[in-house]
Image (cartoon, rainbow, N blue to C red):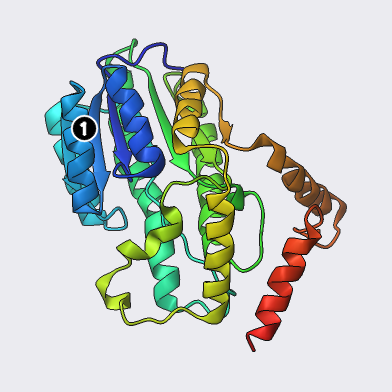
Amino acid sequence: MINHFKGKTAVLTGAGSGFGLECARIGARLGMNLVLVDVQQDALDKAAAEMLAAGAQVLARKVDVSSAEQMQALAAAVKERFGAPHFVFNNAGVGSGGLVWENSLADWQWVLGVNVWGVIHGVHLFTPMMLEAAKADPAYRGHIVNTASMAGLLTPPNMGVYNVSKHAVVSLTETLYQDLALVTDQISASVLCPYFVPTGINSSERNRPAHMADEKPTKSQLIGQAMTNKAVGSGKVSAADVAQKVFDAVQSGQFYIYSHPHALGNVQQRMEAIVMGKNPPDPFAARPEVGEQLRQALRAAD
């Protein structure tokens, strides 16, 4: 639990847009030192200028979080400038849909590289730094927030690559929470599981690696993209709303952070099926027209 944020250092990946940017804005208002990390230089520059204008101390770095070398360089720069961070938000993420057998290996490598390895690198590099700071100072308090998704608690069809990546983040973060509890009372962790929130992740293709530029989306990917765009576009919860939930959770020591708690009914059905040994439930039981629309679109695509 962190009682106050002023003067504390926050590392935020994916800081150029969405949750990362909104968390940075809250951090600036609270007087935090901000380490802004993004792969998109123009968005990073804009975010850094905004936080500097708000009076924050800022270290901005263009980093591909899937790269161990780039993340190691980032960690070294953070330690040199601010020392051990108090708050690490492993938020950078990309989205990709389509039927699981249609995704190219490049799709898998890209999504798992950012969504899973990006979080692994953040945990691997910053947790030891934070533990060292905690050992040296009994007053030190730290917290790590990893961004997963409701897709990390469910298995919606036609978005398997993304589901796999986010299930990994949920598992990693739950284990991190338990591991930290074994060795310290000064550092903890939370997992963010947003539902459909406008953050820019539905236009992740803007940051696809250059070697994937010639890959044409499959019909199932195009169908999935259209449905996701519609769902995100109709969302009532903003990225700023979710960012505030993140800070509230850090302050109170809450582990699971949800943007749409009403969606947990689907999670409960899935968990009950697992416990009872039943087949996976219909993910569209509450909205059968959506399932039928997807089914018809995919079958017509043949």
Q: In the drawing, does residue 31 fall left or right of residue 142?
A: left
Q: Is residue 93 above or below residue 11?
A: below
Q: Where is residue 30 in the image (x, y as percent from the top left)?
A: 31, 17
Q: In the drawing, does residue 36 fall left or right of residue 241?
A: left
Q: In this view, does 83 lie above or below 262?
A: above
**Relative depth, front residue between 11 and 98:** 98
Kindly state the secondary structure of the residue where label 1 is placed: helix
Q: Where is residue 153 in the image (x, y as percent from the top left)?
A: 64, 49
Q: In the drawing, does residue 280 fall left or right of residue 244?
A: right
Q: Position of residue 276 (x, y in %)?
A: 87, 52
Reading the image, the residue beneath label 1 is 50
Mark 1 surroundings: few (<14), some (14-19) or many (≥20) residues within 10 A: some
Quadrant position of the C terminus in the picture: bottom right
The residue positioned 45% from the left and 40% from the top of the image is 146
Q: Look at label 1 and name its amino acid.
A: Glu
The residue positioned 35% from the left and 25% from the top of the image is 26
